[in-house]
Structure formats: C-alpha cells, structure tokens
C-alpha cells in the first residue's frame, strides 16, 4: 500500500506505536531508513517533570540505521483529519521538527511514501528539553540513562512504563535484540535498577510504587 495524493500518514516510532489515541483507517508496520531511535529527548510533561525530566525517544540521522515503527493512515473527513493533526501538534509539541519519510517492509518494498514524522532535535532554542547522549558511549553511558528512566515519573506515569511498553511493542512486531540492541539493553538495565526479574515485563512493573 502506498500513499495517494489525498492520504495523510503519520509514522510513529515511540508512544504512537502503543497509544495512538486518534482515528485511523490503516495501521502498517514497517521501518524507516537513515534514522536511529535514541532516548535523548527530555520529557517534562508526560514521563517526568521540569525538576526531574524523564527520557523519551527521538530520531537522529544515521546513514546505516533503520528504525521499526508504525504508519497510520488518518481517517475521517478533511475536518476530522485537521483535528487529528491539531491533536498531534499538541501531543508532540516538544518535538520541534516535522519530516516526511518513506516506510519500508522487511523485504525492502515501499509501503508508504512521505509519512509525517515528529522529531526532537538538538537545537536547544527550538527544543529546550533536549538531553542528548550520556557522558560515555558505552554500557556505562546507558546505565546513566537507565537510572534516569527508572526513577523519573510524570503526569502520564512512570518513565519505565514508557520504555517497557515500547520494548513489548517491538517484540510484538517481531523485532529482536540484534535489531534494536540499545532499546532492549536499556530495558534490561532499568529492570535491574528496579530489582525486577528480566523475564517479566510491564505487569510486574505496575506492582512497583
């Protein structure tokens, strides 16, 4: 399925995968190319606070990377679609860049052309909540991010819930550890911080106050 001139597609790579909250007629699993998913964006309104930001995902350009996600085709009348876009502009208000991306299948076929994606950039003038990478680019650096995710909490709930739901969504799409090593390593490190059994997922996380 490819995009016609009248179709509007949204590509989700984070919470939009597991919580769309808008009207759509098709949900298409695939991946985009040239972007890497990273936990570099601060969350002060959903998964953290201004005093203690959580971390959510954004995209950074990387020529060899692929990022799995979901493309949604908006449904309803033109006015309904405009309201959906207004809702998304509010929901993604901390993400300062809008880009168009092609979405591919596992075998390299183009599923959707020019899907709209919301990206948080490292431009701190337009994105004051940018946190960026940890001090070191190794497991020690990931442990810094993992501790922040394990302890941050915002109006939408604990930061770790966001991470666990994203990891579970990737598994349900057939994405394994070698396809998104950083995501699943963060999941393991956060569970270690929470003294959780790494074989258990979100349900056990809800037992933690």
Image: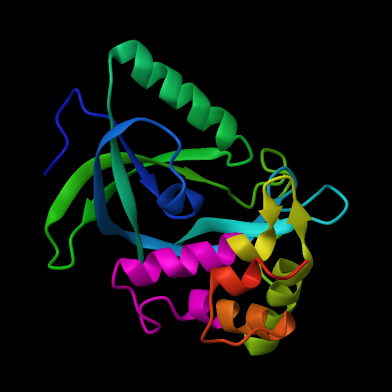
Q: Is residue 54 visible?
A: yes
Q: Is residue 114 above or below residue 61?
A: above
Where does residue 7 sit, x and y in percent of width and height? Answer: 21, 28
Q: Is residue 14 magenta?
A: no
Q: Which residues are magenta?
A: 162-185
* Residue at screen point 24% across, 50% down: 28
* Residue at screen point 61% across, 62% down: 161
Where does residue 49 sit, x and y in percent of width and height? Answer: 81, 49
Name the chief secondary structure element in magenta.
helix
In the displayed structure image, the side of residue 93 where residue 99 appears, left or right:
left
In the displayed structure image, the side of residue 150 where residue 94 appears, left or right:
left
In the displayed structure image, the side of residue 14 where residue 207 appears, left or right:
right
Quadrant containing the N terminus in the rendered view? top left
What number of labels is visible? Answer: 0
Q: Is residue 97 above or below residue 63?
A: above
* Residue at screen point 20% across, 45% down: 112
Q: Is residue 132 visible?
A: no
Quadrant containing the C terminus in the rendered view? bottom right
Q: Is residue 171 magenta?
A: yes
Location of residue 145 (image quadrant): bottom right
């Amino acid at each position: 399925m490819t995009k016609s001139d009248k179709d509007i597609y949204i590509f989700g790579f984070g919470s939009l995968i597991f919580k769309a909250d808008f009207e759509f007629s098709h949900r298409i699993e695939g991946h985009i190319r040239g972007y890497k998913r990273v936990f570099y964006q601060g969350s002060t309104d959903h998964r953290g606070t201004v005093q203690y930001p959580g971390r959510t995902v954004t995209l950074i350009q990387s020529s060899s990377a692929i990022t799995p996600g979901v493309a949604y085709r908006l449904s309803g009348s033109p006015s309904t679609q405009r309201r959906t876009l207004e809702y998304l502009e509010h929901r993604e208000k901390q993400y300062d860049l809008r880009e168009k991306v092609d979405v591919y299948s596992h075998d390299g076929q183009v599923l959707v052309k020019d899907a709209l994606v919301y990206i948080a950039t490292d431009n701190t003038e337009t994105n004051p909540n940018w946190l960026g990478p940890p001090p070191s680019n190794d497991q020690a650096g990931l442990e810094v991010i993992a501790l922040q995710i394990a302890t941050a909490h915002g109006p939408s709930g604990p930061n770790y819930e966001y991470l666990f739901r994203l990891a579970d969504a990737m598994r349900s799409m057939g994405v394994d550890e070698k396809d998104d090593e950083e995501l699943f390593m963060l999941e393991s490190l956060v569970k270690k911080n929470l003294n959780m059994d790494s074989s258990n997922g979100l349900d056990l996380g809800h037992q933690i106050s």
